Amino acid sequence: MQPKDHLIIFDTTLRDGEQSPGAAMTQEEKLRIAKALERLRVDVIEAGFPAASPGDFAAVQSIAEAIQESRVCALARAREEDIRRAGEALAKASAARIHTFIATSPIHMQAKLRMTPEQVLERAVAAVRLARNLCEDVEFSPEDAGRSEEDFLCRVIEAAIAAGARTINIPDTVGYNLPDRFGRLIATLRERIPNSDQAIFSVHCHNDLGLAVANSLSAVLHGARQVECTINGLGERAGNAALEEIVMAVRTRADVFPCETRIDTRQIVPTSKLVSSITGFPVQPNKAIVGANAFAHESGIHQDGVLKHRETYEIMRAEDVGWAANRMTLGKLSGRAAVRARLEALGIHLDGEALHQVFSRFKDLADRKSEIFDEDLQALVNEDAQEVASDRLRLGYLKVCSEMGTHPEATVELWVDGVARTATKTGGGPVDAAFQAIEDILQSGSRLILYSVNAITTGTDAQGEVTVRLQSADGRSVNGQGADTDIVVASAKAYVSALNRLQMPASEHPQL
Ligand code: KIV
Ligand code: ZN
């Protein structure tokens, strides 16, 4: 039997995923996700775009220093300053990659770059050469390749390979392609470009028509050996190809795919939950692989079939993707060492004051909830990290009076730069009243554009995790999260957390 090719899994949750409106993450959150991606055994972690802002630079630098088992990649436009910043941010990585790109479609070259095709080709070659002087491993992307002219695409790619690019990534930037044609495009490029054997072909598909995964898999069947994807399909607009779907399709249909990944699939669900709780983007219940219902059988006929023979209705095993069969729980009597050990098992290393803070929150929660699950611990750590990241505002006290047939009234004490301020307001419901009271104190002028509540675990004593998205007067949107067994408290925490983020300087992403 022929040995299978290796399919490189390139995760861009921290770069393209962060471009989802409202998904901005702090440096500490990015580092936590990067460590989870390393445990998942992704081959390449695209950690960010260092030239975008000092915050992005620092995040890539800290990830490059911390990660040992995955290659760390930084994105750079085909510009000298971007490429040098990427090289600097990656200086301490054990394995690094610079990913440089320039658009090659007629519409992008004319309307966005205002450059001729010859100028674009020249810039691509110069960018790859410079990147190769700074880093052994260089990836080149002709942005909007999916709408580029084939002859020109072939010329640019051939020149980029000759200049030293070892990975050629074909982005379907606007999600315009269809599986059959996109697969054939990859096959054609590999056939037509004389030096194509010196590079690995990669794909990067967006999901505007819901085809990102189908297009990526079709490309793999036509010779692509790297797929760029994100956890939960996060990403610009409708998102990118979902990592979990790509990996499980290749594994489940090993009879069709001539390649395999090195992903530890049991880490898929924990990583999905971590990304969802940090970004505040809930996973829809019927989402393939990681949705709460992905392995739930409702119909009696299905249940009967699964009990008789699992494979009647299941093509994958829930345990194989990390839906834990027997979950460890902690409780009121668990000590600091047990909490610390459980956190370590989740890849969260805390000492000193940080551990003390999380442990005291744990004790407080354990007084109200009999079993503390991994998801509860993750939420405690998220909450602590959010407060550390920016603590200009802190919720001190909240009292809500709610009675059927009357307008609920909320009294809030909010600490603003160390000074306690109080307000009382009524609202359409208890959450509205609490938000009105906070707004009365701060007069932020921000607009609530999304509010969602999810139970973190099962049971009536479960914590509710609330996500609030606010838009500032200047159009910036941020997410805030809060968790508590009382959802009005969780909502107020989430609102304050979003307001705290609005106080942070915006990280300006230059136009990609
Ligand atoms: O979608 C896209 O074209 C990108 C490139 C930067 C690869 O994200
Ligand atoms: Zn993209």
Image (spheres, helix red, strand yellow):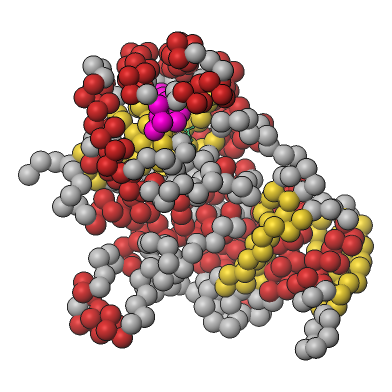
Which segment is the magenta one? 138-148
Residue 70, image quadrant: top left
Image height of 19 relative to 152, above or below:
below
Q: In this view, which residue lies farthest toward the left?
A: 1
Q: Residue at x 51, y 34 (%)?
A: 64
Whether the magenta-drawn stretch holds residue 235 is answered as: no
- The front one of 237 and 77 is 237
Residue 400 visible to the viewer:
yes
In this rendering, position of residue 178 left or right of residue 21: left
In this rendering, position of residue 361 left or right of residue 117: right
Image height of 17 relative to 197, above or below:
below
Quarter of the figure with the N terminus: top left
Give the percent coordinates (x, y) of residue 197. Answer: 23, 23
Give the percent coordinates (x, y) of residue 224. Answer: 28, 35
In this rendering, position of residue 473 left or right of residue 183: right
Q: Residue at x 36, y 36 (%)?
A: 203
Give the percent coordinates (x, y) of residue 149. Answer: 37, 24
- The front one of 97 and 145 is 145
Give the percent coordinates (x, y) of residue 145. Answer: 40, 29
Quarter of the figure with the C terminus: top right
